[in-house]
Amino acid sequence: MPGFSYGGSCLPKDLKALNAIAKNNELQVPIFNSVEISNIQHLDFILKQIEIDGKNHIGVVGLAFKPGTDDMRHSPSVSLCEKLLESSYEVCVYDQNVTLSKLMGKNQSFLNQHLPHIEKILKDDMDEFLRSCETLVIVHNDQQIVDLLIQKYRDKKIIDVVGIDALKICPNYQGLCW
């Protein structure tokens, strides 16, 4: 399934290691070299679409680097939120797997370093989260959010980076997975 930019604690580190090994052995690995560039360009493309949209209250569905975990290390969603906040957007986030009181270790340190005011933007209530946003960036396929969008918030601007077919019936849907 297509999705947003990659992240996590393993793939970015392993990719850098493979590129370093190739460089040390004077090998050309153009695909490996281009993966990180493509990842950054995907994030920049989403940011540009948000800028073009012209709305200021942005909601991000999914903070962890992938659904089903609370691991935010090198999460593209964290990077997206950082860049949006740096550009003076009002940002709120919903991730059913992220509970601030349960975070620990490197995961907690990473989040505190990159989004030090996370407690102000992370929402626990889906309905409150959806009401507070003008534009939603769907990074995780969260069925409860999808159901609420279809039933109650069909007119929200939706930027879908994971390719959720059910959302295509919403009038302001924009699918942007690659």
Image: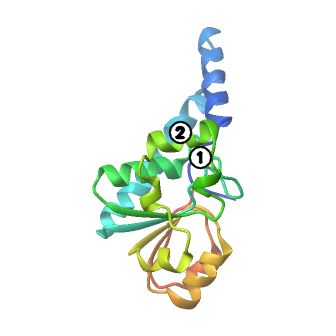
Quick one: 119 or 54, which is closer to the camera?
A: 119
- Residue at horizontal 71 percent and vertical 58 percent from the top: 68
Quadrant where the image shows the C terminus: bottom right
Query: What element does badge 1 sit on?
Result: loop
The answer to the question of whether label 1 and label 2 lie on touching residues, with beta carbons closer than 8 A, is: yes
Which image quadrant is residue 67 in?
Answer: bottom right
- Residue at horizontal 40 percent and vertical 48 percent from the top: 82
Quick one: 145 or 70, which is closer to the camera?
A: 70
- Residue at horizontal 41 percent and vertical 74 percent from the top: 133
Q: Alpha-carbon distance for marks 1 and 2?
A: 7 Å
Q: How many C-alpha atoms fall within 10 Å of the one at disc 1: few (<14), some, or many (≥20)?
A: many
111 horizontally vs 13: left or right = left
Residue type, numbered disc 2:
Phe
Is residue 177 positioned above or below 11 on the image?
below
Q: Which residue is mark 2?
A: 110
Q: Where does the image place residue 90, in percent across and percent down from the top left?
A: 34, 63
